Image (cartoon, helix red, strand yellow):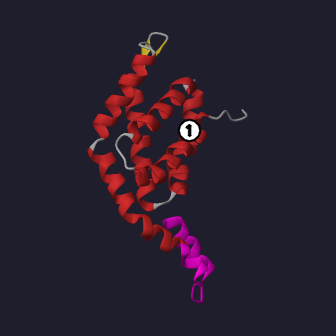
Amino acid sequence: MFTNLERLSVEVDGRYATPEELDFLKSYFGTFKYRISAYQKIKNNESLIMNQIQENLEKMNPDIFMQGSVNLKSKWHLDTVRVLRYSAMALLIDDPEYLQQRLLIWFSTILQAFKVQALTELTHQTMSDVIKGYLTSEENNLFLPIIEMNYNTLCKKRPS
């Protein structure tokens, strides 16, 4: 939304916007009630969502948070909450670019350096499954593409 507004302000400098240039506003306001509802559900259920993701991961592999002798659970929790919160904000303001620029690009480099791609992949697959149970289909239609973008940015290998 903010990225689109900024782009619009540059493109229409000195003139009125065309109806086509304003279409993103119609789309945004048409989905706003679902965005705010999903945002509030994620915010209000954050600890339940996180616990469920963690439990599901540990069911798949009881040692999933161990990297050698190092337990990554608390770091994983902080990082996953951060991604969830930024994702919820991107949903609310309808600005996936915000999420990409503010967090994902930088964070993907960190994850690759620490060699936790397998855990990251499972986390985002599990997050997608868990989130579906908290949101309506309309809300999921708006939020799950953001989770997919997270997965694609954080889990796809980049050339070194």
For the stretch drawn in magenta, the main secondary structure is helix
Q: Residue at x 40, y 24 (%)?
A: 56
Kindly identify which residue carries mark 1.
151
Nearest the eye: 31 or 12: 31
Residue 51, percent from left and from top: 32, 29
Nearest the eye: 16 or 29: 29
Instruction: Name which residue type carries label 1.
Output: Tyr
Q: Residue at x 39, y 30 (%)?
A: 53
138 displayed left or right of 96: left
Badge 1, how many Cα within 10 Å: few under 14, some, many 20+? many
Residue 72, percent from left and from top: 42, 21
**In the picture shown, does residue 55 fall above or below 135?**
above
Q: Which residue is drawn at 35% across and 23% down?
A: 55
**In the picture shown, does residue 133 fall above or below 91?**
above
Q: Is residue 12 magenta?
A: yes
Outermost residue toward the top in this view:
69
Residue 45, percent from left and from top: 28, 42
Q: Is residue 31 magenta?
A: no
Which quarter of the rendering shows the C terminus?
top right
Quadrant housing residue 16 = bottom right
108 displayed left or right of 143: right
| Segment tinted magenta in the rendering | 1-23
Outermost residue toward the front in this view:
137
Q: Is mark 1 on a helix, strand or loop?
A: helix
Residue 83, percent from left and from top: 44, 41
Quadrant housing residue 75 = top left
Outermost residue toward the bottom in this view:
15
Q: Which residue is drawn at 55% across and 43% down?
A: 148
